[in-house]
Image (tube, rainbow, N blue to C red):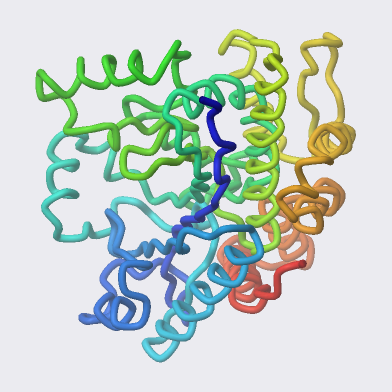
Amino acid sequence: MAIARPAFTVGIEEEYLLVDRESRNLVADPAPGLMNELEELLGHQVSPEFLRSQVEVGTKVCDNLNEAAVDLEMLRRTVSETVRPHGYAIIASSTHPFGIWREQLTTPKERYEGLARDLQAVLRRLVICGMHVHVGIEDPDIRIDLMNQVTYFIPHLYALSTSSPFWAGENTGMKSYRKSVFKALPRTGLPPEFSSYGEYERHVDALVVPGVIEDGTKLWWDVRPSARYPTLELRIADVCTDINDALTIAGLYMALLSMLYRRRRENQKWRHYHSLLIDENIWRAQRYGASGSLIDFGRGELVPFADLVEELLELVSADLDELDCRSFVEHARTIADRGTSADRQLAVYDEAIDAGASVDEAFRDVVDMLIGLTETGLTPVR
């Protein structure tokens, strides 16, 4: 019996940082009842995070990217409008330019308290936010097979998302410092390669049975089979300040999985490269974002990222039409041309410093830009 084509449904999760509009600093202890207000409006689509200065949202399961765009836009707007009367704003940025992790308070929740006991300072430093994209792939063995193959493209998706150039008042010199913080956790980075879903389950059980982890949700790989849903979850991306950038990454991820499935039906597989090589491209994406270059291992040379975008668009062209997400994904050209949120943040900071502003004033300008783009950049390209 032939296996049905995966549904390729999509869901997007985003994490935001809560900032005070006057000081522009993180809100370490938000007003009592704020989360209740959000939950009354958004239900299960909003939730607290480990730190009180964070808010997480998630779209519904969407049949296509147009539906996801509408839902994500609604979530951003609702959270923004709800926190505003308290004197707060949200920023869709993976780090805060000058926020200090030691000053943040944790959310009093049993799950988070358990994680804090296990992970200690490694977890307390996680004043970082990300974006996760779930794509529906019902058959678990196909899910594993596509995970093994899509890892080649993880650096490309990552490069499009970078939004964390600053950390604790320092210009890190990287477009995404978030990953440097996150990789201190165990069970992060690229996933191992598995021959089947059964092999994956056996490895998870080897950690669950002795009580090291409760379940697969504690595997924080860059891409993973979701432990809660029949999806393959992309986790490497920074949260994007511009909603169009977020939808581009989601659409490109969907299209890449569709392309790999199409090739699978034709008994073809993407060439396997050792994780050592993929990790090198991940580092280049972290360091240079969309304005740098990645290694083309087939050619054995560095290729400008803008050229790689064109190659990717050609590679998934048929899938963009089948998934009806071409306009979203072709926005990748714009990202490669004008840069990511990280490039915008650095440009605002440098412009302020060149104009005679102090470092503190320059960081305030960066936060103002992040607030403005998070709140007003809410009309997705369709």
Count of all numbered marks drawn on residues in the image = 0
Q: Position of residue 157 (x, y in %)?
A: 66, 38
Q: Is residue 102 left or right of residue 162?
A: left
Asked if residue 11 can be seen in this view, the reply is yes
Q: Residue furthest front?
A: 1
Asked if residue 103 can be seen in this view, the reply is no
> Residue 117 occupies which quadrant of the picture?
top left
Tell me what residue is drawn at x 37 percent, y 87 percent.
86
Q: Residue furthest bottom?
A: 85
Q: Nearer the viewer, residue 191 or 277?
A: 191
Q: Nearer the viewer, residue 177 or 296?
A: 296
Tell me what residue is drawn at x 69 percent, y 56 percent.
245
Tell me what residue is drawn at x 81 percent, y 10 percent.
298
Q: Position of residue 376 (x, y in %)?
A: 65, 78
Q: Is residue 239 above or below residue 186?
A: below
Tell me what residue is drawn at x 31 percent, y 74 percent.
43
Q: Position of residue 221 (x, y in %)?
A: 43, 30
Q: Is residue 80 above or below residue 136?
A: below
Q: Is residue 306 left or right of residue 267?
A: right
Q: Is residue 280 above or below residue 346?
A: above
Quadrant in which the C terminus appears? bottom right
Q: Position of residue 54 (x, y in %)?
A: 36, 62
